[in-house]
Amino acid sequence: MTMKVFLDTSVLVAALLSAEGGSAQIVEFCEAKLLHGMISSDVERELMEVTRRKFPDVEPYAKKILKAARLKIVKKP
């Protein structure tokens, strides 16, 4: 059985900013289906707002990371 993990905005932003860190490794585990990653629609919205406002260089990759990591959007964590 695959462990379920809820990813918050800070984990996703950290994964976008550093491919070497622990947050990126968690996202990679989700991509490889070693973890079942989940986010809320609030996290998805906040990720897009934060990257647009603070890290515009990585904003184009924000949606890609959500799709690649196969993150399920849950109503309430």
Image (cartoon, rainbow, N blue to C red):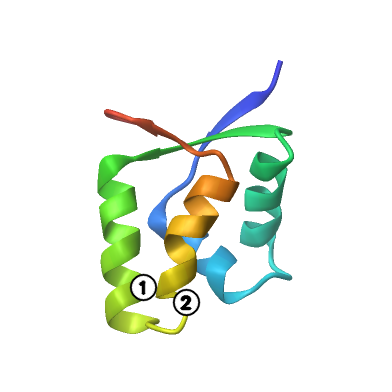
Front-most of 11 and 55?
A: 55
Q: Residue at x 59, y 48 (%)?
A: 68
Q: Are marks 1 and 2 in contact (CB under 8 Å)?
A: yes
User: Residue 72, labelled with which disc?
Assistant: none
* Quarter of the figure that contains the N terminus: top right
Q: Quadrant of residue 24?
A: bottom right
Distance from label 1 to label 2 (Cα)?
A: 7 Å
Q: Position of residue 59 (x, y in %)?
A: 40, 73
Q: Quadrant of residue 32?
A: top right
Helix, strand or loop at label 1? It is: helix
**Three-letter amino acid code of the residue under disc 2:** Val
Q: Residue at x 63, y 74 (%)?
A: 18
* Extreme residue toward the top, this view: 1
Q: Which residue is mark 2?
A: 58
* Quarter of the figure that contains the C terminus: top left
Q: Residue at x 40, y 81 (%)?
A: 55
Q: Position of residue 10 (x, y in %)?
A: 44, 61
Q: Vertical placement of 61 versus 27: above or below?
A: below
Residue 56 as seen in the image, left or right of residue 23: left
Front-most of 47 and 21?
A: 47
User: Residue 51, labelled with which disc?
Assistant: 1
